[in-house]
Structure formats: structure tokens, C-alpha cells
Amino acid sequence: MLELAEVTALLTAAPAAALEALRSGNQLVLAVAGGCAGAVAAALGLRTLRLRAGHPGPGLAGVVAPGAAGLGSRGLRPGAGTQGGEAGLGFHLEGGRLRARDRAARGFLGDETRPLDDFTRRLTPVEGAMDLGLALRALEADGRPFRTLADDDEGRSWEIAGRPEAGEARLVLVPAGPSRREIARLRGMLAMLAADRDQATEALEAAPLLAWRRSPAGHVVWGNALYRRIAGAEEAHGSDAAPLPELHHDGGESRGARPPEGRRSVFDARTGERRWYELAELPASDGGELGYGVDAAAAVHAEGALRRFVETLTETFAHLAIGLAIFDRETRLGLFNPAFASLMRLDPAWLAGRPSLSDVLERLRAERRLPDHEDFQRWRADMLGLFRAEGGQERPERTEVWHLPGELQIRVVARPHPQGAVAFLFEDVSETARLERRFATETEIRRAVMDRLEEGVIAFGPDGAARFVNPAFAAIWRPRAEDLDGGLDDVDVGLAEGGAERLRLPQALEMFRARSGAAAVWDRLAEFFGAPADRAAWSEEVSLTDGRRLRVRVAALPDGSVLAAFTDVTDTARAELATRERTAALEAAEEIRGALLEQVSGRVRTPLARILGLGLALRDEAEDAGAEPGALERIDAILEAASQVQAALSGVADLASAQAGVLSLTPETVDLRAALVAALDMAQRRAAERGVTLSLEPAAGAEGGEQVLGDAARVRQLLFNLVTDAVHRAGAGDEVRAGACRRGGEIEIWTEAPDDGAPSDAGPAPGEPRHGGLAHALVRRFSELHGGSVRTERLERAGALRRRVICTLPAEALRAPAPRRAPAVA
């Protein structure tokens, strides 16, 4: 129902309408110009529209009954309801053509009849049936009536009505005034507003959010479909007397205590499920409130996940060994972990007060936890400048290493964030720095060692480029500039100063082949690069074209590189050749000496044996014949000399056998003290001839305890030669002392005689027989065969220098018998 003010607003836009409104009872009396009474009544939907008489303008009708609608009174005819005296135009339809019924209609058509297409082409529908040709054909074919408002090609407006009448399809055109067009426009706007209202209502009904309206009294009088489902309402509209139910939220506060905005958990009235919404209520124009609720479940879940993530992150930061401090855009400390407080020696309680970065730097400077800076203020300003981006540029990351007292090194990384905060990472790199220094030192040492090697060393990487070359390599191979990739002005200096990578494997192999004749060796080196990872090292010798000889050793390195070492063995080969030649000569001389000794021994022993035999027979005959004592002494002298010669020959043969390693030993237990006494007895005659006194020192340990496991004959021969050597070194009137004692697991046998100043292994003085030198050699050789040794000591006794020759034998001298016996000497 439209009020009076609304009707007035509708009709003020019509220039031809003169409005006067009186309200009496249930009727509205209007003065309207022209034939608009029916249209106004239909537009306003009034029960009665009465036209007051006496107003100018033809065609004034009486009271319009309730229910009047459309374009005018029902049963519009030509001439009725015209404006300005212009009558309506009548037509009827025949066979798809339009025929005029009067003169005015013929004037409109320009002829008696016209095709429908020509007629509809002149008119543009504005309201009602928008497809005029289709409406006309439906009228002619089916008798379907229609009404519309259209404009012709001259800009005039016509009300067009088509209906069946008396078996004909009748068409009436009535000119439409400005009021009628304005009403049509307002009706179109009203329809659009109604469509917009319906669309808005439909959108709110289907929206995935809560929407409701409160009356000025605070009651919910409308709610959309989601609100009704959540709140459990049955109807979409309510009133103050019967409002819609409120949402069931957590806490159960009254509406007056509830904040206008906020996140609430709301319970579904039907399922009891808990849902999260962001609720807000805004003032409405009628004094009520408009309420909205946006689903906040995703935000709640995201915030929960974020909270759990922050808790996990905080716990992780707490166990990090790297110090972390995050300062917000206001340069105040927002987050730190225990490692930061511990590493920088700051009080956690003080840090919890959120000091600024400037205060933290000042505290660190006071605690001597900052390195010295020439301009501290400028450095601090640079640190604070990390929070400001100049010209919209991205703030760069900053890294420093702080060298603190106590050889402490801390790496500080300042990492700006887009939101304006800056995160500082503090890492103790002292151990890393020490390891790096140690590694650098070891690398330098290894490099220095490699540079000082006489071997030429080159290491090829997996890509075939030389990674390392020492000076000896350049000295051995003497590479030229054309051998390198790109060349070098000074090849030796270039290789030593990092130009090794210019020497690649193909060029190196070409250089090796050109300066040596061992092509197979270099082919093997080339194949070594493509071999499996567990390739074994190998070595070869090659001869260079200049006469030098090299030993090549190739080995694989863990990273896939290959190491090649070149040793100049020219001098070694020459020395080896000379050594082999000398050894061959010595072996030949030894064979000749052995053969000579064998020949001499064989040829001398037979006559000597005959001399001894004949001498013994001659002495027996002389004794039987009662020869003079002088004759017997001369015969004894001959026998003594022959015995000495025989003993000398036996010693020479034994010494030769011992030196050749063919002397056989038979192990048995030997009493050294008894053997020593026997040796002294055998040497007594020779000592008496030289005027030397022999004496035996008492045993240092228990008597009979000096026993050794050895060859009895060789041990007795050793002792006899040891005593004989001492007798021959002594002069007339001198004393030779002998003795034996045990020292731990060894037994020492010694002789002591005056020191003649000669070396221990020297022969006798000039004019003396050379038996002493041979005796000492036999003592040394026999002691070595028994696992012992011989040494000489000088000592002072009674103001005179004396020499003691000590033969040391293990208690068990023989571990195993010799593999073969010496050949018998004829």
C-alpha cells in the first residue's frame, strides 16, 4: 500500500500532471490531466480513484473502482482516452497484414494495408510485450491478447492493445502522454528494485555466513537460512512479540554484555556441533542493528597450528647451540634463546625486559664482548640501519666475525625480514677457526714437503687437468710453453704459482711420449683414468731420450684424481750396476781364495803330517839310542814348529769355512771354566817361551756354574785362540790374566794383557809371528757363530794401562745346528 507522500513522489516527475490530493475515508481524490486516471489507479493500487470535476482537459472520467489496472479503462476504443483531442487508431489483422479501419489509421500506415513486418519495424516496445511481431502473430493465430507501450520512428509514444473481437483480431493504438511514459519508467525502476531486492535476499539466503536483523527493541526479527539452521529458527521473519532465537554461543552471556565484535564459538542447535564465527553488529537506519557472522574455523585452526608451530619453534630454539636474537621493527628484542644469553654472557632477566639493540650493544661493549672498532658510533649506526630500507630497496644480509679475548671467535649474521624485523645469529666458530688454521698450516707444510721432494710429483684431477705440480717435476721434464694449455711466459714459475691447471693430461702424455721411448707406459697411464675406483697402484721404469732413467709410480687418490711420481734413478742404476760388478768380482775372488786355501791346505798338510810322523819316530829312536839332550831338544823344536804350522793351517781353514757360512756346529753343554783351564794349560808352554805369566781369576759366581750350550770343539778353539792372542800381545815379564763369569743370561770370558796401543784386531808387532791376528779373527768369528760378540776395554791397573778382550756368549748359544758341514780339507 503506497502512502500519500510516495504517490506524490511518483507523480512529480510527470510534467503534465497537476496533483491535488485529499484524503477522505478510504478514497483518494486526484485531479489528473489527460487520460491517465486509469494508469495512475492501476499503478497506485488504490481501492477508489475519483476524478474531481471542473478541472480542464477532456476525457475526464468518473470514479475508478478498485482493481483498475493496465493502461486505461477496460474496453479501450478508438477516440476514448485520447490526449489533446487525438483519437485512437484502429486496425485489424488479415493474413499477416495490418488493415486500417479509419482515416487516421490509414494516415499512420500510409496505405490501406501494410505487412506486419513494416508495422513492427517502425515501433520499438518500451513496456509490456517486448516482441511486437511475435505478439501480433499470436493474436492472429490463437486470439491471444496483449498490451504494450512502444515508441515509433518519429519519437511518439503509443499505447498498443490487441485482442480478439467478433471473430477478428483487433489492434488499437492510443497516443501515450508524458505522464504515461513516466509511470512506465517508474514501474520499470520499481521492477528492477524488486528484482534487486529478490536477488539480494536470495544471495543472503545462500551466503555461507550468518546474517540477521534486530529491531530497535533488540530482538532478532529476520535471519538468513544459515542463521536459522544454526539458531534453530523455523521462520525467516519474526517480530518483537515473537522474535527469532538467539545464537547459542560459549559463555552464555546476556546480549547486553556481549561485545559488538569478536570471535565466538557457536553451537549448532540441531547437531550440537561447535563452530567458530567472527560476529559483528552494525547500526541500521531504523534504529535496529544488522548482524553478520563470518566463518572463522579456518582462522582458528590456522592460529592453533601457528601457536603449536611457535611453541615447537621456541622449544627448538631453546636447544640450539647457535644464539638467536630477533629484534622487531622498533629495534627492541622480541625473542632470544638461552644460547644467546650464555654465549654473550648476558643476564636472561635483563633480556626479558626487551632492551633495544642499541642498549644490547652498549652492554656487550661494557662486558668486553664486542671487538674493538675505530669508530664505534658509526658501526652501531650501520647496525641500526639494518632496520631501515632506503628507497624501497631490499635490505642486505650482514655477516661479521667478532674476535674476542681468549681466542674466542663468534660469527654474527644479521638477516633482515620483510616486516622490518632483524634476526641475529651468533655462532661460536672458535673451534672451526682453529681447525681451519690447522688445516691451512698442514696444507702449507704438505705443500712445502712436496716442493722439497726430489721426486717429480703431478696430480691430475678427474677432469684431466693438473691440480698440483712440484718444482722437481718441472726440473725432470722441463716442460715448454707449447706443452701447456694457453702457454706461460715462465713455465717453471707459472707451474709453481698456480698454473698447474694449464697442463692437461693429453698435453702431458704427448710430452711424455716425445721425450721417452716407453709408449706402452703412457698408454697404461691414459687407461688408468678410465679404470674402476679400486684401481691398484703400479710402477714402471722408462728411459728418456737424453739418457736419463726414471721410475714412474702411479696411484689413485680418494677423490678420483691420479697421482704420478717420477724419480730420477740414473745415478742409482749406475751405482747398482757398479755394486753388482763389485759383488761379482768379490765372489770370484772369494772362490779363488777358497780354492787357494784348499790347495795350500791340501798340499801343505800332507808333507807336514809326514814331518810330524818322521820327527816323532826320530825322537823315539834318539831316546832309544841314548842321544844327547841337545839333540832331543832340537827334535822337539822341529815337532813344535810343525804343530804350530798345522794349527795355523787348521785355523785358516776354519776361518775360511766360517766366512763362507758352511761351518757346521754341533750343540752340546760345555763347561767354560774347565775349558778355559785346559786352554791355559795348552798355552802355558808358549807363554813360558815368551816369559809371560798366566793366571786364572776365581769365578765371580758359584763354581761350575759357567756353562754354555755350543759346539764343544769350536768353544775350546775359541778359548785357546783368545788366550793365545793375549799371550802374543804381551811382552817378557808381563802377566796375562783370564776369567769367566755369568751376567744375567749371558756368560763373559775375558783375557787381560798390557795395552800395546795397537787396535784390537791388529796383528802382532813387527818381527812377531802373525798368529795373534789370526787368533783374534777366529775368536770374533766363532763367537758370532754362537750368537755372541767380542769387545775391547781399556783399564788402568797399578798405574799401567791394560787391555781386556771380552767374549760374550749367551747361556744357550746355539738355537739350531747349521744346515751343512764344511767340506773336509785334505
Image: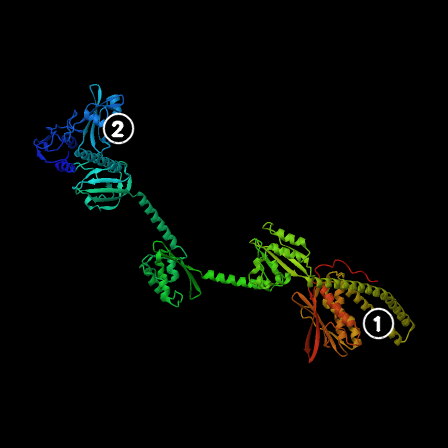
Quadrant of the image for the N terminus? top left
Residue 376 at x, y = what percent?
Answer: 37, 66
Give the number of marks.
Answer: 2
Of circles 2 and 1, the one toward us is: 2
Q: The residue under label 1 is which amino acid type?
A: Ala
The mark found on residue 641 in the picture is 1
Mark 2–mark 1 Cα distance, whole angstroms, equals: 175 Å
Left or right: where 802 falls relative to 634: left
Choose between 594 and 684: the one closer to the eye: 594
Residue in the picture at 38% in, 60% down: 342
Quadrant of the image for the C terminus? bottom right
Residue 488 at x, y = what percent?
Answer: 58, 61
Choose between 321 and 256: the one closer to the eye: 256
Image quarter of residue 717: bottom right
The mark found on residue 120 in the picture is 2
Q: Spot the residue most to the right.
A: 625
**Mark 1 or mark 2, which is nearer the start of the sequence?**
2
- Judge whether residue 412 can be spotted in this image: no
Image quarter of residue 161: top left
- On screen, 775 above or below 91? below
